[in-house]
Amino acid sequence: MRSSVTLHNRLLESVIRAPIAFFDKYPIGMILNRVSRIIDDLLPSNAFDSIQILMDCFAILVLCILVDYWIVIPTLVLLVLLIIVRQFSLGTIRTLKKVEGTARSPTFSHLASTLNGLTTIRSFGAEKDFSAKFDSLQDQHSNTYFQFMTSTRWFGIVLDQLCLLYTIALTIALVSGDLDAQSGSAIGLTLSQAFQLTTNFQWGIRQSAEVETQMTSVERVDELRRIDREFESEVKPPKGMTGHQKDK
């Protein structure tokens, strides 16, 4: 929360002191789009979920290895495959997230300009033109958002398949060994935990990828903090001067 407040305060200070030419280049919709609820609302909860779930998955993997040390081989294979798939898909997902955020800004800008000039639009009878423009911008944003959601769903399906293959390999490794009365309960416990791994591991990797994707919002806010500012004069009126004298 402190980080979010600091980032937004720096952004507000930079935008207030920005030159007038800045607002000609960056419309108000883009600024409103960057000052979103992702940094202070979605990002902390997703980061906490990813850390908690990945720690649970790590505990399950340690439990499985303690039951049978041969399980470390499919476990290492699973981790390598997960890292490869994550690196392969994360670049596309992060790029689509930036494109989706960029496509959302014109929608806000068009809506703000439409509401400000509503009387002029009605007087010239241009309601249909502005409605068509808004629908076109909304369609462009929907297209990018659909591609972003499709890529994340594909990422989740691949993670599910990898965890399923790991569960099958784990079951074969446990059942093919010598069983006795004591190891039977341990194998049952291991399999029950491995079934939970299919859901938890997939969701934890997805949440970690979502956290890295949502960090683009921090990057976009930090970009506005680095804009050029107007010259700040240190000359101040005397303390005893009245408001009328200040105007003069």
Image: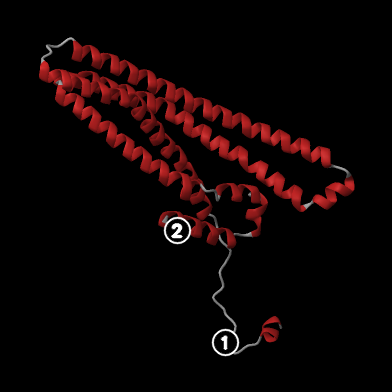
Mark nearer the N terminus (2 vs 1): 2
Query: Which mark, by number, is residue 202?
Result: none
Look at discs 2 and 1 and give the one toward the viewer.
2
Query: Residue lying furthest front in this view?
Result: 181
Q: Residue at x 57, y 58 (%)?
A: 15
Q: Place residue 202 in its image quadrant.
A: top left
Residue 51 shown left or right of residue 88 in the figure: left
Q: Between residues 150 and 56, which one lies in front from this camera angle?
A: 56
| Horizontal and vertical percent position of residue 208 | 38, 36
Q: Would residue 57 be found to the left or right of residue 174 on screen?
A: right
Frontmost residue, 132 versus 50: 50
Residue 6 shows which numbered tag? 2
Which of the pair 169/224 is nearer the observer? 169
Image quarter (top left, top right, bottom left or bottom right) of the C terminus: bottom right
Residue at 81% from the left image edge and 38% from the top image edge: 129
Question: In the image, what residue type sits under mark 1?
Answer: Lys
Q: Describe the element under mark 2 as helix, strand or loop.
A: helix
In front of the other: 95 or 86? 86
For residue 137, above or below residue 122: above
Residue 226: in sight, yes or no? no
Find residue 172 and report its horizontal and vertical position in percent: 23, 11
Kind of residue at badge 2? Thr
**Residue 194 x %, y %:** 27, 23
Identify the disc placed on residue 239. 1
Q: Residues within 10 Å of mark 2 (few under 14, many from 20)?
A: few
